[in-house]
Amino acid sequence: MAAFMEVLDTTIVNVALPHIAGALGCSYDDATWALTSYLVANGIVLTISGWLSRTFGRKRYFMICISMFTLTSFCCGLSQSLGMLVIFRLLQGFFGGGLQPCQQSIILDIFPPDKRGAAFGLSAIATIVGPVLGPLLGGWLTDNYSWHWVFFVNVPFGIITTALVAGILEDPPWEKARKSRIDVIGISLISLGLGCVEIMADRGEDDDWFSSGFIITMALIGFSCTIAAIIWLLKSKNPLLRLSVLKDRNFAVGTVLVGAMGMILYAGAVIVPQFAQQVQGYTATLAGMLLAPGGVVIICLIPFVGKLMGKVELRYIIAFGFMFMATSLFYSSQLYTGTSFGWLVKCRLLQSAPLAFLFVPISTLAFMTLPDELNADGSALFAMVRNYLGSQAISYSGAGLTEARQLHQDQLGTATAPWRVAMRQYIQDVDKVAQWHGFAPLRAKSYAVAHMYQDFQVQVSMLAYNEVFQILGMLALSVVPLCFLASPGPRSGGPAKGGH
């Protein structure tokens, strides 16, 4: 429940952004800060959640995160200005960032190795289905109530989860609170590095990338602080995040794979409803409905994949998942002007199904040989890479769509020149239809030109979305060879940690 709330909030706001912009009196671009601020804070705290868990004790830190996430969700719903909303979304992302690594390390400590695959399967339903169902729930709440309810919906779940954790969960001895000094330098470098890189990615297209002094500044600060943070964490005696987890080959490979999966997962969850609303003219609810069947497919496939993990090497399952994903994305890159709702649902089903072959096997592979004392640090880094690269993919997919539109608009511009016979014939035909419907001749001519321009923009958008799907497909295909860098996973009844 805790993981589901947190992951849900990464996408539930997407379809409500036009309504938020209208209600708070700001532009759509400014309203996207409601999404970006959450992702920035989330990515930063994920890197230090292991240290916070050791400092406060895992159970206490987990309860603090759940209760404060619930409170800040309520405050987001009460916001009356964009500034208030951004501040509370920052706080919501900060406290929400600790939920995923905590619940993952709890699974690793509580369940024996032969049961971890099943436990990861249950948690995967929340982690994967959350971003899928977010736009559906957000669209329905926005259309039927108001955008405020995309935040209020967390409150009852948060209260129930806090009570259950308080009454049931107990920390193992190595997760009890223990004194440790505050690593001010490490926290500062990580916060500045990840925060500035995310801001650069999110605002780069609007500010014309490196033509803007602001973007150059964000890039310099972001990358220099990130490199400095890595050096500091490697040399510090008591680092807030032990990068030694990456010495484990399976964990290192699994982290790269889950980062690629996160990029595809979050980018797809944003692109599909965006296409439905901006190009097809769907309502927020109908746009969200495109993603719901995909969530159902994942839930149905995860038990099958759990059984398959006992018979087939994890590397082959993961490689198949990425191959399946690449094929589905290439198939989805065939959008055309007559694209139907049913075809879009089928595309999203094909995009969602491979996730069942990726999340649980990748999680199991990553923690298969990692020592118990590194579970908290591994969980924090694993979740951070997935979410942070996912947030980067959201920003760059939006920028990629804008760039692709401009490119295809220039390329197709000559095809719409008025001296072309086909264009003159098109305008004449529309003109005649408009006059037949009662338009005055001058108005009919203007309508015909406007109709031609609208069709032109739709064609440009179709090509842009197709191109982004192709890029995501190539990303999925490129990581297939990386699957075989990991050591072979255990088969049924295998003794290795984290496997089935």
Image (spheres, rainbow, N blue to C red):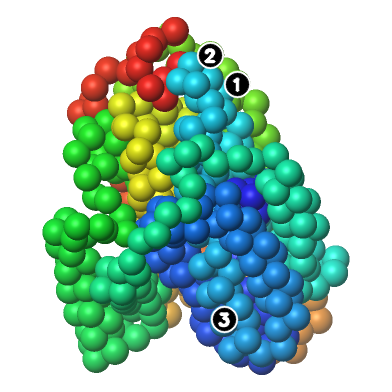
Residue denoted by label 2: 307
- Circles 2, 1 touching at the beta carbon (< 8 Å): yes
The amino acid sitting under disc 1 is Pro
Question: Residue 8: where, in percent of width, then height?
Answer: 62, 55
| Viewer-nearest residue: 319 or 362 | 362
Q: Which mark is residue 152?
A: none
Per the image, the residue denoted by label 3 is 86
Q: Amino acid at mark 2?
A: Lys
Other residues around mark 2 within 10 Å, as few (<14) / some (14–19) / many (≥20): some
Distance in Å between CA atoms under marks 3 and 2:
44 Å
The answer to whether residue 54 shows anywhere in this view is: yes
Q: Which residue is mark 1?
A: 303
Location of residue 353 with respect to 311 vertically, above or below: below
Q: Earlier in the sequence, mark 3 or mark 2?
A: 3
Q: CA distance from mark 2 to mark 1?
A: 7 Å
Q: Residue at x 18, y 64 (%)?
A: 232
The local secondary structure at tag 1 comes to: helix
Left or right: 373, with 87 as reference point: left
- Measuring from the top left, give residue 272's x and y in whole percent: 56, 54
**Based on the displayed image, in which of its 4 quarters is residue 44 positioned?**
bottom left
